[in-house]
Amino acid sequence: MAIERWPQKAAVAQSSKIVWEDRMDRLARLFGPRTGPLVAHWLRFFWRNNRFRTIYPLSLPLAAFMLFYFSRQSHAGGPFSGGPFPLALAVFGILGFVGTGQFAVNQFGYVGGGFRRFLLLPTDPAAAFRAGSYMFASLSGTLIVPAVVLWCLLGPIPSTVPMVLMLVGMSLSSLFLFHGIALWTSVLGARRGKYTQSFGNDLSLAGNVVIIGGMLTLLFGPQAVAKVWPGAISPVYWWVTPLLAAACAVFYFASLRFTSTLFRTRREQLMALLEGRG
């Protein structure tokens, strides 16, 4: 009875101050209270990966190097002799996905046995899948603004408003198109990768076709068009790439809807594959 009458002591933790919000949470807040925490999770997950921290920051310098190097090669003839603007169009297209494409085509490939934890969240099982795609597309989109500024300041030819609109439209077109395709490869062509591996190619056949084939198509496509139809790649037709970007955006959001349904039906197969049982 005496022990029962003793006042209770509150258990006070003496550890350091708990921080509930960090930089990733503040960035992901733009996606709202339902999707934001999942986007913040993917930001932390991939930003701790050495390969991602190497490839993504180098995307913009790589695009500048490609533009500078192939511009010098164009004076000697060859496949890049179509002029500086078709080459810039190709480089801006590559910039739309090169920073995140290698990871977007195999989104769950690096989570391993942690994949089943996404299925235990008190939300739609495909919510984490959509949040990862939003994160990849947003990170690729942020590279477009500094690329346009550098082009206007240091470009080999004077910039005009129609030219800038055409270049931005090309970047957005490749962004939505390839991240839409990446949704399908993440579900249908997933492959178990090594999170700690800094170098190497651990993508599936579908992932390699999308990344390598996409870069080659964007690099040589505008040049081929400029040679076959001289004058077709011109700022005069600046409205073409914004319309193409709108069509690719429709494809991306339609793919997001259909692959979310497909993800729910294939989650057991994905779990077995990523855990090394399939």
Image: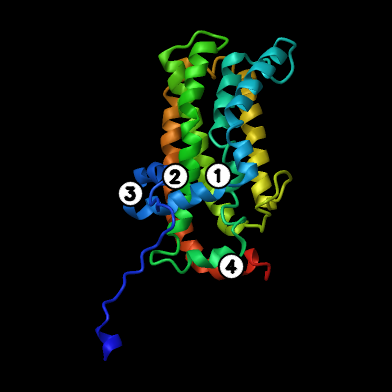
Nearest to viewer (mark 3 / mark 4)? 3
Dot 4 alpha-carbon crowd within 10 angstroms: few under 14, some 14 to 19, many 20 or more: some
Answer with mark 4 or mark 2, whichever residue precedes in sequence. Answer: 2
Dot 2 and dot 3 residues touching (CB under 8 Å): no
Provide the secondary structure element on which disc 4 rests.
Answer: helix
State the CA–CA distance, disc 1 to disc 3.
21 Å
Q: CA distance from mark 1 to mark 2?
A: 10 Å
The residue carrying mark 1 is 47
- In this view, the residue farthest toward the bottom is 1
Residue 244 drawn above or below residue 8: above
Quarter of the figure that contains the N terminus: bottom left
Q: CB of mark 1 within 8 Å of CB of mark 3?
A: no
Find out whether the residues at labels 1 and 2 contact each other: C-beta distance under 8 Å. Answer: yes
Read off the residue under disc 3.
32
Check if mark 3's residue and mark 4's residue have beta carbons within 8 Å: no
Looking at the picture, tell me which residue is in the foreground, 162 or 13: 13
Residue designated by label 4: 271
Q: Of callouts 1 and 4, which one flags the residue occurring earlier in the amino acid sequence?
A: 1
Marks 4 and 2 in Cβ contact (< 8 Å): no
Q: Amino acid at mark 2?
A: Met
